[in-house]
Amino acid sequence: MGLNNVLVLSQVTTYILTLLLAFCIIIPISFHLIDFKGHCLLFSNGTWRESDGQLVVAWASVGFCDYNLVWASISLFIALIQTYRFAAQLCRGTESTFLSAFLDVVLSLMMSVAALAGALIVTMGYQTWCDAIMMRFEACEDATGNNIDKQDDIDTRMFYTQLGTAQFGAWTSWVCWVGLSMFAMLKLCKYHQQENIRVSMARERARLVRERHSPLSEGGVF
């Protein structure tokens, strides 16, 4: 199996994994928003009321959850298209063009940045929420199943699992996109090297043609 086939096969495998990981972000965050009545716990904070032991939450923007839903949906869409595209290349034995390989590099790098931002938002935002929870409980997961916010009527039974799954999906997706960036760069370097070889061969042919038709080769005398 040639280097190009190895790279394409690696890309197909990683894109399939990226596609599956997108569901690990979209599904749990979507259910979290339903359970929390449209509120997003990321970067949300609050204080515990002494009278009834309820958490008075200062809800952060729902945009933190929406961002992860958006970039994960884009990741899912791109992974679906790229999986089909590269799988077709493997079956037909064709190769990408230099331009398409360059666009793959740019796209992968952009998605790597988006995935890193999403993973940091989930991790840091979730930690802010847990810091508020642990002002009363020993661990963040201890708040699951406890009616800590009757005012907003949120359901906290699954938030620990939901955000834990989303955090795993976000960081693993970032690793996958970094890997896809590396595969795309290797393929671009391969195409660039091939182009340099073709240019060098063309120059060598031109030089040989010039020497063949020079006066010395025809027995001319200066």
Image: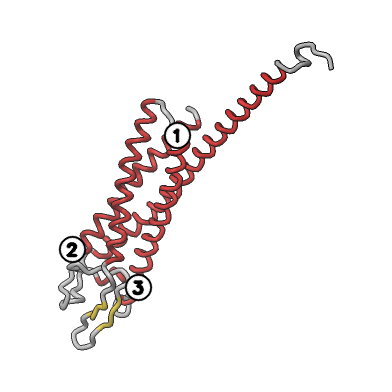
x, y percentage for residue 222?
A: 84, 17
- 163 over 60 or under it: above or below: above
Q: In the depicted view, which residue is nearer to us: 131 or 178?
A: 178
Q: Which color mode does the image show?
A: secondary structure
For discs 1 and 2, the disc positioned in front in the rendered view: 1
Measured Cα–Cα span from mark 3 to mark 2:
20 Å
* Residue labelled with disc 2: 34
Residue 161: name its quadrant: bottom left
Categorize mark 2 by other alpha carbons within 10 Å: few (<14), some (14-19), many (20+). Answer: some
* Residue labelled with disc 3: 128
x, y percentage for residue 61?
A: 28, 70
Which residue sits at x=47%, y=27%? 1
The residue sitting at the right extreme is 222
Q: Which mark is residue 147?
A: none
Measured Cα–Cα span from mark 1 to mark 2:
45 Å
Q: In the depicted view, which residue is nearer to us: 104 or 15?
A: 104
Which residue sits at x=35%, y=40%? 82
Q: Pointer 3 and pointer 1: residues touching (CB < 8 Å)?
A: no
Residue 154: name its quadrant: bottom left
x, y percentage for residue 136?
A: 29, 79
Measured Cα–Cα span from mark 3 to mark 1:
46 Å
* Residue labelled with disc 1: 97
Q: Is residue 152 left or right of residue 159?
A: left
